[in-house]
Amino acid sequence: MEVRRQTDLLAEPLSAEDCQVQSMPDASPTKWHLAHTSWFFETFVLDGAPLEPSFDYLFNSYYEAVGPRHPRAARGLLSRPSLDEVRRYRRRIDERMLERIERGAADDVRARIVLGLNHEQQHQELILTDIKHLLGGHPDRPAYRRRPAPSGETAPRAAAALDWIPRPGGVTEIGVAAPGADGEPFAFDNESPRHEVLLRPYALASRLVTCGEYRAFMRDGGYRRPELWLSDGWAELAGERRERPLYWRSASADDDTIYTLDGERPVAVDEPVVHVSYYEADAYARWAGARLPTEAEWEAAAAPLASRDDDNLADTQAFHPRPAAARPGGLRQLYGDVWEWTASAYGPYPGYRAAPGALGEYNGKFMCSQLVLRGGSCATPRGHIRASYRNFFPAGARWQFSGIRLARDA
């Protein structure tokens, strides 16, 4: 119920009109997220006839085994059911779920409930990223909510020094054993099985790349130098006339602003750069004389380090990256702030097998033409992230809270 309440709270600042609109095919209306996460529990956990048979078509996301579905790019056209009807649907599903839990659940049903909760937490992050894309594209760039900025949050400051943290090479293990096996905590199936990888000695940057550092890349002609860009990225730049990260605007060379969920404000040079594509992250790394880490390098470094209480995850309610904390030595900002692009293609681990049935479509069928991101963001719930978590998006995606950590060979 806490997970379900958090989803409802994220929708509270929004009008019915906000919840209806879809800004692009990759984003979904908030109303659709509210309905789909309820449909998931109804379809994969609850017994009996569906409350609304048409919802199987309207709110199925991509489960071909369940049946046909409404086209993703046209979800914003679903003016009915109304937002009030969707909220009533959520309450009815909650009631049925609580009754189901009270009756007791076999291990396989409990596993589906836990999967559904983690699935809903993913959609909580999507509610924030999708509404930011909608409001950030509005001519007035209205705020999702209004809250006073913490003292000094937007004041220009020098970023904490970037250090290089050496990491040994050799054989190491990444991933998790079969999710749910032997009392292990929850993990998605794409995080397993645990397996060995061979790493060469390398080093990771102690913190994320900042807006000030990325601005230097821009001012050095970073978006006009083809030698820095992968071919598809360069073609995308030309096609979209791209010259800065998503949500940045520039009135002059020294007057950049950025749209945040709290509204538009000046770019803070010490904050992590955010909303960059893989192409932009890779081009910046080349310009900086470095590279992006592989996902195995990232996990090997992060696994011994649990998330800290001061990590900037969704629980802080900042919903925007913060400057690296001033603490001596070691890796900072591993969890939260921004999803960190890696150089690794999203594919199956050795020995991976998708689960049978419709739930087997959850991750496995997307293992093509996408890149892995690690670490979570300022929109990721704290209990949802771990060192083994594999997020994945196409190389050109920018509407997620994605940023850059550099790596280099030792």
Image (cartoon, rainbow, N blue to C red):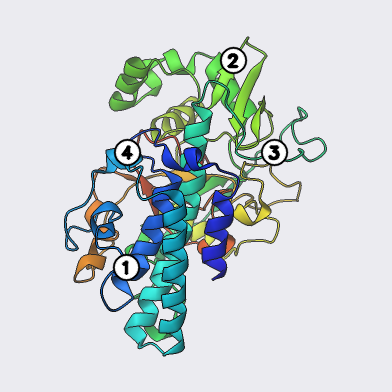
Q: Position of residue 312 (x, y in %)?
A: 64, 51
Q: Residue under circle 3? A: 146
Q: Residue under circle 2? A: 250
Q: Residue furthest top?
A: 252
- Give the spatial CA distance, label 2 vs label 4: 34 Å
User: Tag on residue 203?
Assistant: none
In this rendering, the label closer to the viewer, 2 or 4: 4
Q: Position of residue 56 (x, y in %)?
A: 25, 60
- Give the spatial CA distance, label 2 vs label 3: 23 Å
Q: Residue at x 40, y 85 (%)?
A: 182
On screen, residue 380 versus residue 68, left or right, reads: right
Q: Amino acid at mark 4?
A: Leu
User: Tag on residue 51?
Assistant: 1
Q: Position of residue 200 (x, y in %)?
A: 42, 52
Q: Residue at x 19, y 70 (%)?
A: 357
Q: Residue under circle 4? A: 77
